[in-house]
């Protein structure tokens, strides 16, 4: 039986308590008819497949772009500008030519997901928004904040600091073990 190589110790991230109004905002009933957006999305046939269907992708499930129409997107962007104090919202150009994802609707099923922590790169992104269009999501589903778990169940950090722009740079790996 082959033995596994010793697991590399990941760098420890600094910890910053997520604070509503600084690090995240929560709004209910953002769109006037979220169920219509959901039905329109589910009727589309141009879904792009992610992980596990395409192993080279780090994002799970499947998605379509654009997700919201211009009027719907304007509602979300106005709310983000008001909450954050930003004068404008824009999409940067990726320095390496990578595709940036903006205004996507993504479906992730129970068999398509696992712990896949990430941060959006600060090179091309300042804010991210998640709209839930499913009216019947269990309480234990959804977006959460990542925090490292160290040996002995000791808690680590959750914050990527310069000079790093994302978790891949800060941790030195794209894939984080499930118990990290």
Image (tube, rainbow, N blue to C red):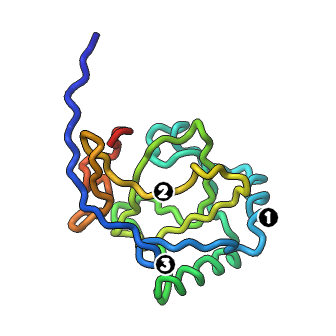
Disc 2 + disc 1, Cβ < 8 Å: no
Give the label on residue 80, or none: none
Q: Residues within 10 Å of mark 2 (few under 14, many from 20)?
A: few
Question: Which callout, 3 or 1, points at the residue further toward the start of the chain?
Answer: 1
Which of labels 3 and 1 is toward the front?
1
Give the label on residue 144, or none: 2
Disc 2 + disc 3, Cβ < 8 Å: no
Q: Is residue 17 left or right of residue 105?
A: left
Residue 151 lies in quadrant: top left
Residue visible at 24% across and 17% down in the picture: 3
Q: CA distance from mark 3 to mark 1?
A: 26 Å
Residue visible at 47% across and 62% down in the picture: 100
Residue visible at 61% across and 54% down in the picture: 106
Residue assigned mark 3: 90
| Residue 2 rendering spot, x and y as whole percentages | 26, 14
Rendered view: 26 above or below 113: below
Residue 69 lies in quadrant: bottom right
Q: CA distance from mark 2 to mark 1?
A: 26 Å
Rendered view: 90 above or below 94: below
Q: Is residue 64 left or right of residue 37?
A: left
């Amino acid at each position: 039986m082959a033995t596994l190589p010793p697991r590399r110790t990941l760098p420890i991230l600094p910890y910053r308590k997520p604070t509503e109004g600084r690090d995240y905002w929560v709004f209910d009933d953002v769109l006037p008819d979220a169920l219509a957006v959901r039905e329109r999305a589910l009727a589309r046939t141009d879904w792009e497949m992610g992980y596990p269907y395409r192993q080279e992708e780090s994002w799970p499930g499947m998605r379509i772009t654009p997700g919201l129409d211009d009027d719907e997107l304007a509602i979300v962007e106005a709310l983000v500008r008001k909450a954050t104090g930003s004068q404008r919202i824009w999409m940067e150009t990726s320095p390496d030519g990578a595709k940036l994802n903006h205004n996507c609707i993504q479906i992730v099923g129970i068999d398509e997901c696992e712990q896949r922590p990430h941060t959006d790169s600060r090179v091309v992104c300042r804010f991210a928004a998640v709209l839930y269009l499913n009216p019947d999501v269990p309480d234990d589903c959804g977006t959460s904040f990542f925090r490292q778990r160290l040996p002995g169940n000791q808690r680590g950090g959750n914050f990527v600091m310069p000079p790093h722009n994302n978790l891949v740079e800060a941790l030195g790996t794209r894939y984080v073990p499930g118990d990290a």
